[in-house]
Image (cartoon, rainbow, N blue to C red):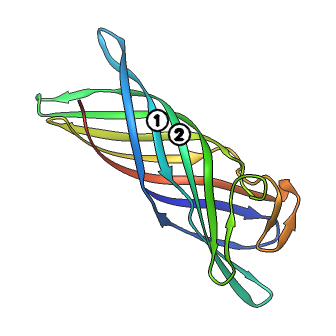
Amino acid sequence: TVSTCAISIEDVRINTGSRAGFHFAVTDQILLHRSLPLYLETGVDFSSRGGKIALAQYGEVYRTTPRPFYLQVPLLVNCHFNVRDLLTIQPFAGIYGGGGPWGRMEFDCLGTEELCGDRGVLHRLDFGVRAGVGFVVKRIYLGVSYDIGCMNQFKGGSLFSYESRTRAIEIRNDCLSVTIGYNF
């Protein structure tokens, strides 16, 4: 996965960058109609999200890397298009919901802080939209998807020593994933 944190703070410019992560998933598909190749796909996946953040404040540049981990449950609709019994193309779209059981924010010179929980700045829950396409050749699956976070992850507190009201800061997860798998 390659993920970013979309961050906006009123009157403060924040530069965000991408961070490479990982995800593991187990999914299943249920045929919705016998005469149509439409499927409902669900499962569970564990993924690493986050990004890189740089904030210029008072002539100094502060850098941090948030590293949240999420357990997610997608609910997707996909369609199977067979190409000469050699390749199956599977475009899909839907939603996902997840929980962030843990995570840390690593600062360049200040150490680490908890992201979730009582002292953290992020909510444990996440929700978003997922779309992508998968390709199957002889049971080998290759997929590409993009997640757009729809829920503001910031629950309040201090971010970069910037004490803020909850509405002043928005943090959302966006993630591009490449998946390699095997269909049983």
Q: Are marks 1 and 2 in contact (CB under 8 Å)?
A: yes
Q: CA distance from mark 1 to mark 2?
A: 6 Å
Residue 87: x %, y % from top left: 17, 35
Q: Amino acid at mark 1?
A: Val
The outermost residue toward the top is 34
Element carrying mark 2: strand
**90 or 123: nearer the viewer:** 123
Front residue of 119 and 19: 119
* Left or right for 5, reference 27: right
Secondary structure of the residue carrying tag 1 is strand
Residue 181 lies left or right of residue 119; in this view the side is: left
Check disc 1: other Cα within 10 Å, few if <14, some if 14-19, many if 20+. Answer: some
Percent position (x, y) of residue 116?
Answer: 69, 54
Q: Which mark is residue 147?
A: none
Q: How many neighbours does mark 2 have within 10 angstroms: few (below 14), some (14-19), or many (20 or more)?
A: many
For label 1, the residue is 44
User: Is residue 21 placed above or below 52 in the rendered structure?
Assistant: above
**Quadrant, the C terminus:** top left
- Using the rendered view, name the quadrant where residue 52 is placed: bottom right
Is 1 placed above or below 162 here? above
Residue positioned 61% across, 47% down in the render:
101
Amino acid residing under circle 2? Gln
Query: Against 66, is 86 above or below?
Result: above
In x, y percent, where is residue 151? 68, 44
* Residue name at image x 37 percent, y 26 percent: 28
Against 86, is 15 above or below?
A: below
Q: Earlier in the sequence, mark 1 or mark 2?
A: 1
Q: Mark 2 = which residue?
A: 72
Residue 11, percent from left and from top: 82, 70
